[in-house]
Structure formats: structure tokens, C-alpha cells
Amino acid sequence: MAYQDKLNIKEKDLDKEIYRIMPIHRLLEAFELEKLTLVKPEKWDDPFENLLLKGTAKTSDGELLDFAPIRDSVYGQCWTLHKETDAMWRIYSQDKQGAKVKTTIRKLLNALQSQSGDFAKVHCFIGEVEYLTQKDLVSKLKNINVLNTSGSGIAESLIYKRVEFKHEKEVRLLYTEKSGRFHQFKIDPFDLFDEIVFDPRINKHLFDSYHDSLKNKGYKKSIRQSVMYQVPKGLRISIYRDRE
């Protein structure tokens, strides 16, 4: 069986860097518990999320199939290919104390699959979101075989969004086996997170405190504050007067 655990992602792109902004308490929790948490797509804001699994299907015998049991067995976590944007900080770090972690597509998928047993490739997926018009989105979803034997159909239904969200450049980590209100999996944050960048607006004393705390835990990679809003030093403007 050919497994399709990488959706809309080519092998040559597996080492692309991806990013996620999280509240500081979630970052510290990841180091304390050594776990990441995936939530059900119903927690996501867009009403078009999980659109296919919210509906029903008709079998060749005319029997109606309710996707509710499948829908309750899907969990996800959103990352982005954007290194940094103003919108990301303002949306996901509203208290100005968030932190952005960096990893790669390959490392994130491997982390999930390594904790998911013999059937990891039929339950663990990662996909780059494709953005479509509403008409094309509905058409695409209608042609997905949710119940295919490789297990990828359920995950595939969650990697298409409306074109209005194209600015997100999203990558989604997905897990498709029922495990409660959310799904947690074990990670090694010291290996998985290749860099930690704090909100450019964070108070300097808070940044220093979090920086020292993470270093004391043994994190040896880069920890810094974003300089997105920092005015360049030594900026000098030349003014030329018109000659009369």
C-alpha cells in the first residue's frame, strides 16, 4: 500500500522551515511536559473548516452515511511557512508575550509518527494548505474519498481552505484516531525547536526572565526577541537643497 502521509508536500520540501506562535505558558508547558497538543478542527474559527466531515454521504446502495464518528476522531495543529509577519504577532500574541518556535516539516511529522505505533502512517499526516475559491473548494471536497484504505482521505479534507485565507501560508499537522477532547504526543523540545523568537513588543525584563529560564532548562539554541518594530540605528537622511 502506498501511504500518503505528506499532502501537497514534495519530498524535496520536507526540510522547509515552519513556524508557530504560541502563548508563553504553552511554550513553557512544552518544555515541562515534553508534549504538544492537537485540537479538534471544530475549535478553528472558519465555519468552512471540516466542511466535508460536517455533512453526510450516500453509499452506492443509497444508504446515508453520517461522518460524526470520523469527525470526532480528527485532531490538528496549525503552523505556517511565514517566517514573520505583523499580522501573525497581532493575531496570535495579543498580550505581546507570545513566542515563535521554528522547526521543519520533516521533524514535526517524525515527532508525531514516532509516538503513534505501528499504524502511524495511516493516522499521522502533514499537509500544506491549498487555497481555493468557494466554488472550487466545494468541488474539491466532493471528490475526496474520505474512506480510502491509506487513511489519507480524512486528512486531505482538512488541507483546503478558501482563497480569502491565502495570506496564512498554512501547514497542518493532523492525527486521525480518537483520543478524547484533544491529542497530545511526546516531543523532545530541545531537538524539535530550532529557534525561539519572542514578540517584538515584549517587556525587556520579561524577555530576559524567559530567556534565562529556558537557558537554565538546558536549551542551547538561539533565543531572541524579534526586531520587527525596531527602528534602524544610525538612520540618517540626506537633504539636498535646490540650487537657485
Image (cartoon, helix red, strand yellow):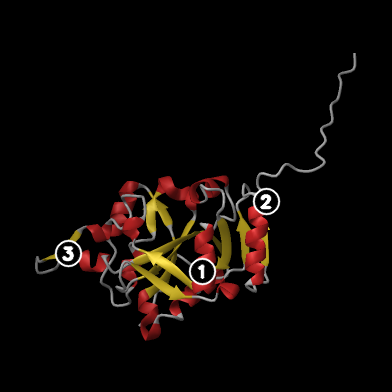
Figure check: 191 above or below 65: below
Write the residue at 80% across / 38% down.
235
Q: Decide if residue 64 is on the left or right side of residue 143.
A: left
Q: Amino acid at mark 1?
A: Ala
Mark-to-mark CA distance, 1 and 3: 36 Å
* Nearer to the camera, 24 or 111: 24
Sequence-wise, which precedes: disc 1 or disc 3?
A: 1
Farthest residue to the top: give it.
244
Q: Which residue is mark 3?
A: 66
Tag 2 secondary structure: helix
Q: Position of residue 5 (x, y in %)?
A: 41, 74
Quarter of image, res 82: bottom right
Q: Position of residue 83 (x, y in %)?
A: 59, 56
* Nearer to the camera, 166 or 71: 71
Figure check: 40 above or below 205: below
Write the residue at 43% across / 63% down.
77
- The local crowd at label 3, few if under 14, some if 14 to 19, many if 20 or more residues have their Cα within 10 Å, is some
Figure check: 229 above or below 2: above
Q: Quadrant of the C terminus?
A: top right
* Nearer to the camera, 1 or 19: 19
